[in-house]
Amino acid sequence: MEKVSMQPDWVFSPQPMYIIGTKNETGSPNFCVITWIGFSFDKVPHLMLTIGGSKLTKTNILRERKFSANMITEDILWLADYFGNTRGEDAEKKGVAYGYTWGERAEVPVINECHWAYECEVTKVVELDGAHLFLAEIKNIQIDKKFENMNMKKIDLEELRPAVYAPYCYFSIGKKLGEMGEWKKHLHISRDFQP
């Protein structure tokens, strides 16, 4: 396969999407969409979140040091699109109907329509050039009751149906391709191979 080099840019960064919930100074909820998210582990599970520029969500996290991360699935995509295309700094986001409750282990707003949500408390903030990276301990995970019997070691994304972002477009997850360790079924094994 011949390859060519290109300048690093945002051209291809397929990412999971989350509605981030924070508490405003007034005590009301604020929601926005963030795609710069990853997961880490340091004795306990952590979520890593990067927010650039001026955003009410970032201001709230710096003040409160906690947030919720509500997984965006196909059925709540357009609610998420609304949150991602309106600014909390301009006005409270009340343009469409949605429900929320406060977290069970952290005082953060959680979207009622969301099937999978993390309640997080910030343990470390790294100030970058124009952005902040938040490392947050996952204090609780709320899941839709219909998923309570799902095998949590092999989460079925076809059933959960998360939406994925690639710059300016949304995609769904395709079919399951296989399971970890099935490489022997799909690749030619050299005679010299010894596990």
Image (cartoon, rainbow, N blue to C red):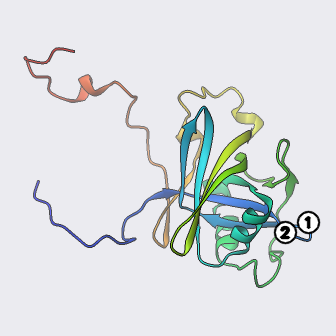
Q: Is residue 69 left or right of residue 164?
A: right
The one nearer the camera, 119 or 46, is 46
Task: From the top left corner, tell me how far across and down residue 31 is, in percent.
Answer: 74, 66
Secondary element under disc 1, as helix, strand or loop, is loop
Task: From the top left corner, tell me how far across and down residue 107 is, in percent.
Answer: 85, 52
Name the disc covering residue 24, or none: 2
Q: Amino acid at mark 1?
A: Gly
- The residue positioned 55% from the left and 45% from the top of the image is 39
Q: Which residue is mark 1?
A: 27
Q: Amino acid at mark 2?
A: Asn
Q: Are marks 1 and 2 in contact (CB under 8 Å)?
A: yes
Single out the residue that lies furthest toward the right.
Answer: 26
Quadrant containing the C terminus is: top left
**In the image, residue 84 above or below residue 180:** below
- The residue positioned 25% from the left and 24% from the top of the image is 185
Q: CA distance from mark 1 to mark 2?
A: 5 Å
